[in-house]
Amino acid sequence: MDDGEDVTAGWLERRRQAVDPELRAIFVRSLELGFLGSMRIGDQLDHALGFVEILESECGGPPESVVDLGSGGGMPGLVLSSCWPGTRVVLIDANQRRTEFLADVVEEWPRASRTVVVRGRAEELGRQPEFREEFAALTSRSFGTPGATAECASPLLGVGGVMVVSEPPDSPAGGRWPADGLALLDLRPVASVRPLESYGYQVLHKTGPLSDRYPRRVGIPAKRPIF
């Protein structure tokens, strides 16, 4: 995708058709439980489909594996599962109520046969061998500030992997993701894209193996971000 691209054409309708109709009822429950924002569910689905479109463009098709950092009420993680039934999808969140909800959904929903819910802090999971630099792609909708998100995400993303982060609607293109700071985490900013006028995303690539220094202890990336 080109930097700053604004495309509202046929890709969205095509992506909508790939979403399991059962998901809408699941997201209604998620909204009622307070796990999703106040935006209309249809709009949140479109936003989640932006992750799908960008990652397929970057990866040349569905990635072999993807981790959704801070999965919350299931956006975009469950949408990724719906669109990519052959992809290993791991949904990470530290909150017990949210992960219990997601685990129940995954257990009951046939489309989620390759989806796993993991409860834990990203700073700790990123040091565990089964998660460290194991994923071809990573998504983050509202995990935290750019510095905290990058430090918690890079340990999970494999070398050569693609990371897509949702951006605030009024954020300057690439302005929140300094190349020098990202280089400390072996990440490179690639593009700020806007496949729909209302939604922006930052795309980053993992350029090399991450130093054992990262991630720092639980809470430190948010309290003392490296950029």
Image (spheres, rainbow, N blue to C red):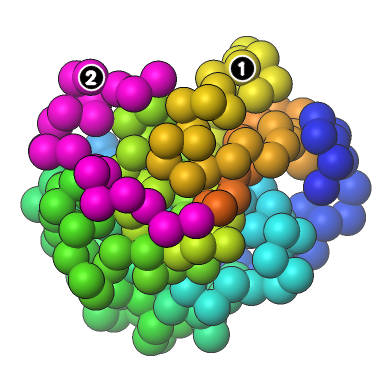
Q: Residue at x 23, y 44 (%)?
A: 213
In the image, residue 105 above or below residue 68: below
Q: Which residue is mark 1?
A: 175
> In this orientation, does residue 70 appear?
no
Quadrant into which the C terminus falls: top left
Q: Which residue is mark 2?
A: 224
Q: Amino acid at mark 1?
A: Gly
In the image, residue 198 above or below residue 73: above
Callout 1 crowding tier (Cα within 10 Å): few <14, some 14–19, many ≥20: few
Pointer 1 or 2: first along the chain? 1
Q: Residue at x 59, y 72 (%)?
A: 63
Quadrant location of residue 175?
Answer: top right
Q: Residue at x 16, y 28 (%)?
A: 220
Does residue 196 appear to the left or right of 70 in the view shown? Answer: right
Query: Percent x, y for residue 1?
Result: 82, 47
Q: Amino acid at mark 2?
A: Arg
Quadrant location of residue 221?
Answer: top left
Q: Which label sits on residue 142?
A: none
In the image, residue 65 above or below residue 139: below
State the extent of the magenta-drawn residues as a range: 208-227
Query: Percent x, y for residue 214?
Result: 26, 44
Magenta span contains residue 221: yes
Magenta span contains residue 106: no
Camera-side residue of 135 and 199 = 135
Query: Percent x, y for residue 122?
Result: 22, 49
Does residue 155 appear to the left or right of 219 in the view shown? Answer: right
Q: Are marks 1 and 2 in contact (CB under 8 Å)?
A: no
Camera-side residue of 118 and 37 = 118
Callout 2 crowding tier (Cα within 10 Å): few <14, some 14–19, many ≥20: few
Disc 2 secondary structure class: loop
Q: Residue at x 25, y 79 (%)?
A: 107
